[in-house]
Amino acid sequence: MKRRTLVTGVLCAVATGCGQREFTAPRNLDDACALAGERPHYVRAMRRTERRWGVPVHVQMATFHQESRLDGDARPPFRYALGVIPMGRQSSAYGYSQALDGTWDEYRADTGNRRARRTDIDDAADFMGWYMTRTRDRNGIALSDARNQYLAYHEGHAGYARGSYNAKPWLLRVADNVAARAEVYRVQLQTCR
């Protein structure tokens, strides 16, 4: 009887876990250790990406924070005509990484990961590693340079090469914030158990 109860409990836990999707941000986005404690699979995904692509966890974490606040269902806001008529979203960005449709399709084709989903942290982290590695190769930006990696992530490889971000003081401030957050995360991650 105990065995059957145990098996039933385990099956229910597995079924519940498989059906859950985390489309809400973690509670404490300012503390990397708390984030790792609340969502350990996020950090595991980022560590796999660091091993595969070389992008440090703290750089990924800071970029995810800026792009989606680690919300798997994040989307850009709607545009409105005359202030009231919805005209669709500002871009096709979606999910943890806020990858655009075309860039996401390019990632899936290039890596052979056809089933990748932007709402899956494993796939989103792998995408970020792939993209930032290409940024290093195309634009010469070190994988540990959170500020310039973010600028290239936001503007695209060609936009970064043209220096399009220089005409956007707000984006330069955001990139500075990403770099500062990455450094805070780096220090915090060194102290986590």
Image (cartoon, helix red, strand yellow):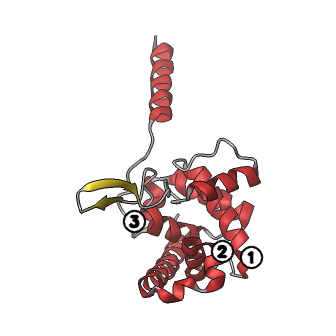
Along the polypeptide, which appears first: circle 1 or circle 2? 1
Q: Between marks 2 and 3, how big is the CA–CA gap?
A: 28 Å
Quadrant of the rendered structure where residue 5 is? top left
Question: Which residue sits at x=51%, y=81%?
Answer: 179
Question: Can the viewer see residue 44?
Answer: no
Provide residue 162's location: percent of width, then percent of height: 63, 84
Task: Characterize the local packing of mark 2: few (<14), some (14-19) or many (20 or more) Cα atoms within 10 angstroms.
Answer: many
Camera-side mark, 1 or 3: 1
Residue positioned 57% across, 54% down in the render: 101
Tell me which numbered mark, 2 or 3, is placed earlier along the sequence: 3
Could you say which is closer to the camera, residue 41 or residue 101?
A: 101
* Residue 79 visible from this viewpoint: yes
Identify the amino acid type marked 3: Leu
Which residue is the site of mark 2? 157
108 in relation to 15, above or below:
below
Does residue 180 sit above or below 6 in this rendering? below
Above or below: residue 125 compared with residue 169? above
Seen from the viewer's position, the closer of residues 97 and 61 is: 97
Q: Which numbered disc, 1 or 3, marks the residue that appears first in the sequence?
A: 3
Residue carrying label 1 = 138
Residue 94 on image: x %, y % = 49, 54
How far across and how far down the image is residue 186, in percent? 54, 75
Dots 1 and 2: beta carbons under 8 Å? yes
Kindly state the secondary structure of the residue where label 2 is placed: helix
The circle on residue 29 is 3
